[in-house]
Image: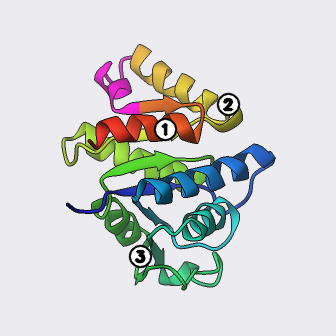
């Protein structure tokens, strides 16, 4: 039996609300307690650092992937189970997604959106069939959910697009979905 891995996209900043960091820590702990490996952007700052430290503290495996140009900027977390330095951001995203069985998205900025939309686009194109769960910490992703609905309503995607995303209000709800999806 192979260990399941979940790729977590999240911010390199803590964000404005304490709930974001609390949810990052809860997800990191939950992944470790489930015996699943965290795959993430290898940063030791912001929500990235929170999710990784929580997973490590709970005894979980961690796989971090960071492009060379961000090693100092995002304080590359080198004490991970596996630490990979890539040449480009695109290579980072590919290595992260290809080494995961599922994707979970916590609050974040442009980078997190880029990662989410690349994974979603690849899913839409049939390049993978991995579950994607968006953790809507304190309603952070409500505008994104409305935007996805708007894209469909305006005819730029069909309704199957929403089927590729699962929206969860808490890390616990996200984990319940992932347990079912990865069973």
Nearest-to-viewer mark from 2 and 3: 2
Q: Secondary structure at mark 3?
A: loop
Q: Residues within 10 Å of mark 3 (few under 14, many from 20)?
A: few
Is residue 50 rendered to the left or right of residue 93? right
Indicate the position of residue 163 as horizontal and vertical percent values: 33, 26
Q: Which residue is mark 3?
A: 88
Q: Which residue is mark 2?
A: 139
Specify which label sits upstream in the sequence, 3 or 1: 3
Residue 154 visible at all: no
Residue 135 figure quarter: top right
Indicate the position of residue 59 as horizontal and vertical percent values: 52, 69
Is residue 167 rendered to the left or right of residue 101? right
Q: Is residue 163 magenta?
A: yes
Q: Residues within 10 Å of mark 2 (few under 14, many from 20)?
A: few
Quarter holding the N terminus is bottom left
Residue 50 visible at all: yes
The residue that appears at 31% across and 57% down in the rendered structure is 4
Question: The magenta stretch spans which residues?
Answer: 155-165
Specify which label sits upstream in the sequence, 2 or 3: 3
Spatial CA distance of label 2 from label 3 is 32 Å
Q: Residues within 10 Å of mark 1 (few under 14, many from 20)?
A: many
Nearest-to-viewer mark from 3 and 1: 1
Asked whether disc 2 touches disc 1, contact meaning CB atoms under 8 Å apart, the reply is no
């Amino acid at each position: 039996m192979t260990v399941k891995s979940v790729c977590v996209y999240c911010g390199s900043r803590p964000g404005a609300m304490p709930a974001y960091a609390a949810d990052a820590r809860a997800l990191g702990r939950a992944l470790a307690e489930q015996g699943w490996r965290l795959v993430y952007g290898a940063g030791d700052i912001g929500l990235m650092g929170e999710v990784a430290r929580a997973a490590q503290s709970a005894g979980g495996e961690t796989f971090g992937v960071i492009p060379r140009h961000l090693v100092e900027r995002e304080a590359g977390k080198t004490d991970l189970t596996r630490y990979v330095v890539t040449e480009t951001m695109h290579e980072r995203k590919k290595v992260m997604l290809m080494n995961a069985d599922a994707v979970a998205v916590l609050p974040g900025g442009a980078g997190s959106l880029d990662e989410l939309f690349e994974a979603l686009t690849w899913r839409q194109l049939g390049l993978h069939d991995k579950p994607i769960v968006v953790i809507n910490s304190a309603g952070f992703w409500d505008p994104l959910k409305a935007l996805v609905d708007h894209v469909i309503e305006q005819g730029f995607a069909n309704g199957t697009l929403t089927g590729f995303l699962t929206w969860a209000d808490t890390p616990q709800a996200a984990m319940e979905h992932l347990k079912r999806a990865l069973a």
